[in-house]
Image (tube, rainbow, N blue to C red):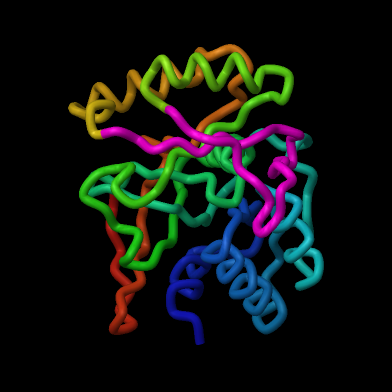
Amino acid sequence: MDALAQAAVAPVVSGMLVGLGTGRAAARGVSALAYRVATEGLKVACVATSKATEHLAGQLGLRLVDASTVASVDYLFDGADEVDPRCRMIKGGGGAMTRERIIAGMCASARVYMIDEGKLSPRLGHRARLPIEVLPLARQLAALRLEEIGLEGAYRLEPGQREEFITDNGGLVLDAPLPEALWASDQALTTLAERIRAVPGVIDHGLFLGECQRLLVEHKDGRIESIQA
């Protein structure tokens, strides 16, 4: 059995509206939740953070609700690409950070993120690039303004192809290294997040600085560590 996924969905009870994250770790949680629904008769509804997660959840028999019709969810589980000692995260490896932030914003008090221990990092940007979602119309302007901030990156391509990656929102994703100079202090990261969002054409970015409330870490020995943020 998948101990990490089981731990992520263990708090779910009948009657909940559950937010489903995007990515490999989140997909494990979706499968574990579907198993509980099938074997325990849980009555839950779900909102998905991406078309890929929506497709998987539908295939596994989970009942889906259009996120645009709700303002709050009871519980959210998701993954992350990198997490620092204060449970601040970089997300967006799957290109779903905008919808992931929206669904996280709908969940006030039960946001759980799942990672393997290799994604723990002494600082954000040590192992992951920062994804930034941009309107195609603003691709050149946004790249220039982001470079002025210190974020010089490249627009993401589809894996193994020359075509640019397009998000579920029709946006492009610029992946930028996060220089050490940009996170010299806690306030610097918060300021950076605000500066990125202020760039014309930027839809959202992968800095999730306050969303994590509980972090589940899968260690190589199979142990699952729970960290309260």
Examine the rendered structure and indicate whether residue 203 appears above or below residue 48: above
Residue 27 x %, y % = 61, 66
The answer to which of 149 and 227 lies nearer the viewer is: 149
Judge by depth and name the residue closer to the eye, 147 or 74.
147
Q: Total marks drawn?
A: 0
Picture quarter containing residue 63?
bottom right
Q: Residue at x 44, y 73 (%)?
A: 4
Q: Residue furthest bottom?
A: 1
- 109 or 187, which is in the foreground? 187
Residue at 61% x, 51% y is: 19
Judge by depth and name the residue closer to the eye, 156 or 82.
Answer: 156
**Vertical placement of 85 versus 227: above or below?**
above
Q: What residue is rendered at 29% in x and 47% in y?
A: 126
Q: Which residues are magenta?
A: 152-179
Left or right position of 42 against 65: left
* 28 lies left or right of 221: right
Q: Is residue 65 left or right of residue 218?
A: right
For image coordinates 59% across by 75% down, the residue present is 32
In the rendered image, the vertical position of residue 166 relative to residue 199, given as above or below: below
Q: Position of residue 166 (x, y in %)?
A: 72, 41
- The kind of secondary structure the magenta stretch mainly shows is loop
The image quadrant of residue 163 is top right
Q: Is residue 63 found inside the magenta-colored segment of the image?
A: no
Q: Position of residue 48 (x, y in %)?
A: 69, 51
Left or right of residue 221, residue 165 in this image: right
Residue 135, image x, y percentages: 69, 24
